[in-house]
Amino acid sequence: MTQNSNTEIRKMLDRLRVMMAEDAAGQTRLNRITQLIALEMISEVCSIYLFLDDDTLELCASEGLNPEAVHKTRLKLSEGLVGRVARTSQVINTNDAFGTRGFQYKPETGEDPFKSFLGVPIQRLGETLGVLTVQSKDARIYTEREVQDIQIVAMVIAEMTELGAFVTDNAAMSARHQQPALFNATSAQEGAAAGHVWLHNPRVIVTNPIASDPTAELERLSKAIRELRVGVDKILSIATPDDKEQLEVLEAYRMFASSKGWVLRMEDGISRGLSAEAAVEMEQSNARTRMSKVTDPYLRDRLHDLDDLSNRLLRILTGQGTRPWEEMPKDPVLVSGNIGPAELLDYGRKLKGIVLEEGSVGSHATIVARALAIPLVVRAEQITTEAQNGDYILVDGDRGVVHLRPDDAVSYAFRDKMAMQEKARERYDSIRDKPAITLCGHRINLYMNAGLMADLPSLEKSGAEGVGLFRSELQFLTRNRMPKRSDLSEIYARVLNAAKGRRVIFRTLDIGSDKVLPYLKWADEPNPALGWRAIRLGLDRPGVLRMQIQALMRAAAGRPLTIMFPFIAQREEFAAARKEVDKALERERILGHPLPENLEVGAMLETPSIAFSPDKFYKEVDFISIGGNDLKQFFFAADRQNELVRRRYDTLNVSFLRFISSIVSRCEKHGTPLSFCGEDAGRPVEAACFAAMGLRALSMRPASIGPVKSILQRIHLSELREIIDKANTQGHQSVRPAVMEYLQGRF
C-alpha cells in the first residue's frame, strides 16, 4: 500500500466522518454516503443493501439506480450477486455482472447499462449486516486498492449501523433493547432459572471508527498493546506453578500479544484512516472470518486466542467492559456466544442459568453445566446482540426457550413453574435415602454420571448408589498438554476418596468425534463419529492407555477398582484392551505397588455390532454398560449433534426396545451384569420402560435420580411390560402413547 493510496482513503473517510457528524435523518445520511462513495470510486452507481430479516436484503439507498427502487427492491440470500455476497461473506469483483454466476435481473432498478460490479459485505465481527456495491458502465475490474478501500468503508458503515446512525427514529434503536424478546433454542440441561443477564464478553461499541490523526492513533494502539502485554506478564508472574493449564494458556496469550504480524495489520488499518479501535476490530473481524473456514480444532483454538486478545485490547482502548466480577448481579444468568469448560468452571455454581448462541448438546461446556446442575440452552441465535447486562431473563431448560425482558404475564407463569419444580424437589429429597423398589418388588439400582470433582458432592445429595460412569476425558480436555500419570493418579484417588466406598466405574479416555485434544495430531475425517476415537485411539496409542490404567491402579491403592472401555465394536478390541490391564497389573506387582483388592473390567455397548458378538465376549467381560447416546444414533443412523434429525427418532420405538430386550436376554443367559447409561436413563418415562424390559441398573445425571426413583416406586413392571408388548403386537411404531396413557392413570 503506497503512501499516496493511504492518503486518498483517509480523505474519503474524513469526508465520511464530517458527513456522519451532521444533524441529518438516517435516510439522508445513507443517500449522502452513496453519493460520496460513487464520486470517490469514480463509479456511476453505489448502493447499500441492509438486512430486513434473517433471509432478506432490502435496497436502502442508491446513487445511480432508479430512486423508486429504494425500499422496494428486495433480495433473498439465494438471489442475485448481492445475495451471494451476503451469504458467503466473499467479495465479488467482475467486469461482466450479467454473465456472472448468480446474477438476477431486477428491472425496477434500471441497472441495465452497468457492466462492472463490486460487492463487499457490510460486516462487524463476523456478523453480516448488509452489502455495499459499486457499479460502472465501463467493463472493468476494480483494482486491489479500490477493493481494500471499499472494504474499509463497509466496515465503517457497519459500525454506524450498529450505533443506529441510519435509523430514521433514533428512539426506536434504544426502544429495541427495552422490548420483550423470545428465543427458541435447544435444551442442553433441564431446569428453570430466573435472573439477570451477565454477558461473558460484553460487546464493545466503537463510537469513533474514523480518525483524522494517524500518528495519535498509532500511539494509542502502541500504549494499549504495552498495557495488554504488561497485564499478561503480571498474571503470569503471580500464577502458581501448580496451575500448569493456566500457565500454558497465558503463555499462548503472551506469544500472540507479541506477534509482529498481528500488530502490523492493525497499524496498516490506522494508516488508512481508521481509529485504533476500528483497526483492532477490523483485524478481529478478519480473524473470525478465517476461523469460520478452519476445520482443524487446534488452529481454531489459536484463532480463538487472537479473538480473545482483540477483545482485551478493545476494552483497554475504550474502557468498556472492564468492570470487576464483584459487579455481577446476585442472580447471574450467563449469556455468551460460546464458552469453554475451563472458563465455565471459573464461574462455578455462581450462575443461575446459561444461554449460548452456539454450542451443542454434546459440547464440553454442556458436560460441565450438567455437572453443576445449571439450566442450559444452546443455539439461541442473536441473543448476544439483543441482551444487555442487567436485563431480566428467564431460562426454560426443559423446553429450550429463553424470555428476555419478559412481560408480567410471562413472569407470573414462569414463577408458577419454578414453584412446582421446587415442590417436586422437596418430594425427591424425602425419598433420597430410600431404594428404588417398584410396587412389584423389583429393585432398580440408580447410579450417577460424573466427570469432575464438582460432581462428587452429588453422591450424597442425589441418593445415588455410586458412580456408573466417570468420564476421564475431562481431565485431558481442560489442559493444553498431555497430563502426567501422577496428576491423573491424584485426581482418581480423590474421586475414590469422595465416593467413600461406593462403586465408581472409570471409563478410559473417550476422545474423538466431537471431543478433540489440541496436543494430539488428528486426521481430517469426513465422519469423525465413526472414525478414530475412544478405544480405537487407545489401542493405536497404547502408551496413553497404559499410563491411564497405571494411574487408576495407583489411585486405588489396594481398594476395589472398576474400569470400563468405551466404544468396543468387536470382541478382539476388548481382548486387546484387557491385555493392557493385565500388563499393568504385572508391572505394578513387580514394582511392589499395592494391587486392587478387586478388579472389574467391562465394556460399553455403543455399537450394534458388539450386541451380536460371540458368546465368548459375554463370558469375558465382567460387566456391560449400554451407552445409550451413541447406540441410539448408530441404531437409527441419526447424528445426535444434528438438530435436523436427532429428535426424529423416539427412544421408545418398538424396534429399539426389542433390541434392548435382546441384549438383556444375552446378558441374563451368561450372568453378565448389565446397566444402561445415558441421557435416556435419566428421563423417567424411558427409565421405567428400560426397567420393564429387564434392566436393573441405570446411570444418569444426579438431578435425574429423584424423578426416576419417584416414578419407579409407583409402578408395576409386569403391567408396563404388558403395555409395551401389546403395542408391539399391534404394530405401533412407538410405545410412548400407550405408556403415557398407563402412567397418567397411575399418578
Image (tube, rainbow, N blue to C red):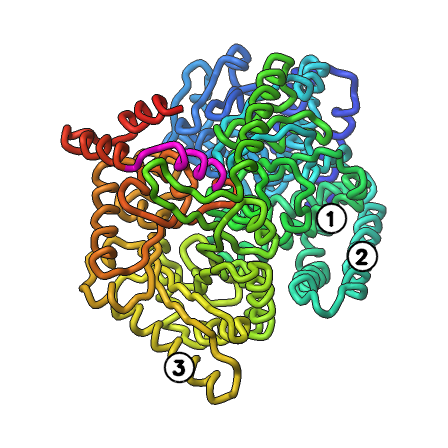
Q: Which residue is mark 3?
A: 583
Under circle 1, the secondary element is helix
Q: Which residue is mark 1?
A: 312
Nearer to me, 270 or 718: 718
Q: Which residues are magenta?
A: 705-717
For label 1, the crowd category at 10 Å Cα-Cα, with few meaning under 14, some 14 to 19 and many 20 or more, is some
Q: Among all residues in the image, which is located at the extreme bottom?
A: 590
Camera-near label (1 vs 3) is: 3
Residue found at x 48% / y 28%: 399
Task: Check disc 1 and give the amino acid type.
Answer: Arg
Task: Check disc 2 and give the amino acid type.
Answer: Gly
Residue found at x 51% / y 75%: 558
Please say if 551 is above or below 70.
Answer: below
Q: Which residue is mark 2?
A: 231
Looking at the rendering, in which quadrant would you find the C terminus? top left
Question: Do the residues under discs 2 and 1 have CB atoms within 8 angstroms?
Answer: yes
Q: CA distance from mark 1 to mark 3?
A: 50 Å
Q: Among all residues in the image, which is located at the extreme top?
A: 68
Residue 223 drawn in magenta: no
Nearer to me, 601 or 376: 601
Under circle 2, the secondary element is helix
Secondary structure mostly seen in the magenta stretch: helix
Is 520 displayed left or right of 214 in the figure? left
Residue found at x 73% / y 48%: 312
Q: Is residue 63 visible?
A: no
Under circle 3, the secondary element is helix
For label 2, the crowd category at 10 Å Cα-Cα, with few meaning under 14, some 14 to 19 and many 20 or more, is few
Circle nearer the N terminus (2, 3)? 2
Circle nearer the N terminus (2, 1)? 2
